[in-house]
Image (cartoon, helix red, strand yellow):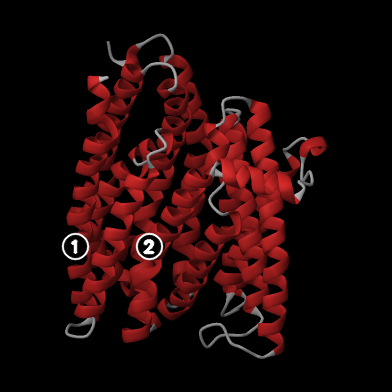
Amino acid sequence: MSFINQKNIKKTIGQLGTLLFGSGFSFLVNVVGLYIYSKLYSAEQFGVFALFVSVISIVSIVTSLGLEYVIVLQKTVKEALYIRNVCENIVIYFSLILVFISVLLVAGSIQFFDESELIWILVVMSIFSISMINIFISWNNKLKNYKIISTYKLVQSISVSFISVFLGYKNVSLGLVFAYSIGVFVSFLYLWRSIDRKHLFKRIELPELKLVLSKNRDTINYSYNIGLLLTAVKALPNFVLGHFFGLGIVGVYDMSIKILNIPKKLLSSNIGELFYQKGSVLYNRNNMKFVLLARDTSKYLFLFSILSYFLFALFGTELFSFFLGDKWALAGELSEVLSFWYMLLFISSPMAYVFYIRRTLNKYFKFTVFVLLIKASFLFIIVNYDTAINSVYLYTYVCIGLELLLLIYIYIKGFLDLKDE
């Protein structure tokens, strides 16, 4: 019998519904926000924002060492709480170092990609907020506090969208950067207030910290490296396109990605959170039930991916022009090809949790290194010999092929051998 049709179906649907409630409202807020500030900001301003977020995403992986992934894998809440405290200590230590570095950068008048050096202060604030958010999300996922996770998404989308629109009307050129920094900090404060103060930011002595890092060394090493590599791969086009063709094409590419990311965040990420939590429990109890869960999850992901992106594949240019205006028609044109890649990402992102659940991250890490080398090599070659638009198209074709290969790899290395046990 299919796992999804057993007695826990109502509970699972209820938990997914709770996550989708916040994500659904966040979706509406993000759509309205994008509609408004796509008219207030230029493609170049979106390009600066894309570079800013890329830097934040990469460095925030470093600050937590990827240890937050271990929280969900703990067998008891007490063990998970201890790992959470360790994560909090690590982020605080790294953040203090980053504060010192940012002060030096500002004092030395070192600009952020030809923009104001004061952005470095926002960089540190955003890195700290995102790192803590990742920890608190993992903790609430462990406790099945999906209502808190759902509300957090709504808080972040409202704060970022409102501030972006307000600063856009005030003609603040870096409005998107300021809005993102303030928005993620507000989101951090919400999650922080939702946690029991008695167990929050509890100091961990250095010997204890070393012991935890040593005990989870393999998982930390691979999850940290995988997170860093995946984030680098995601940010790679922004840096390369910006260097060779300017911030305009980065802004256009980023706008297309932003729109295509909405259904992925709305459905795929929420399904992934449930799969990670439930899969972690089932894998330790019954391998066959875990395989059934994975099979059913992949089926629903495939169905939702088609429904989410087929309109973009057919009418991307028209949709972007109609909703965002003619200046974003090129972003819509790019989305017609990028949507095929995102159909596959919609499925592979949640299913890749199998490597975390089974603690076989070494396999995923090897594949991620392979992907980074292929994408980086290909992208650096084509930007030297082709136009910006053709470079994006060719790069996307490579991404589609690699994503198909990843899905095959997940099936072979993640599930096939379990069926025989």
Q: Amino acid at mark 2?
A: Lys
29 in relation to 420, above or below: below
**Along the polypeptide, which appears first: circle 2 or circle 1?**
2
| Label 2 Cα crowd, 10 Å radius (few <14 / some 14-19 / many 20+) | some
Where residue 383 sits: x, y (%)?
23, 81
Q: Is residue 204 left or right of residue 314?
A: right
Residue at (24%, 71%) from the top-left corner? 392
- Determine the residue located farthest toward the bottom in the rendered image: 109
Vertical position of residue 19 compared to residue 126: above or below:
above
Q: Residue at x 17, y 82 (%)?
A: 386
Q: Residue at x 23, y 36 (%)?
A: 411
Q: Residue at x 56, y 80 (%)?
A: 173
- In this rendering, position of residue 369 left or right of residue 57: left
Q: Is residue 328 above or below residue 61?
A: below
* Quadrant for the C terminus in the image: top left
What secondary structure is found at the residue carrying circle 1? Answer: helix
- Secondary structure under tag 2 reads helix
Total label count?
2
Query: Which disc, if any, is residue 368?
Result: none
State the residue in front, 408 or 413. Answer: 413
- Disc 1 residue crowd, few under 14, some 14–19, many 20+, Cα 10 Å: some
- Circles 2, 1 touching at the beta carbon (< 8 Å): no
Question: What's under tag 1, amino acid-wise?
Answer: Val
Closer to the camera in the image, 314 or 346: 346
Residue 150 in view:
no
Expressed as whole percent of the image width and height from the top left, the position of residue 267 reads 39, 39
| Residue beneath disc 2 | 234
Front position in the image: 122 or 138? 138
Q: Position of residue 240 (x, y in %)?
A: 34, 78
Task: Report the disc number at residue 398.
Answer: 1
| Real-space Cα separation, disc 2 to disc 1, in angstroms | 14 Å
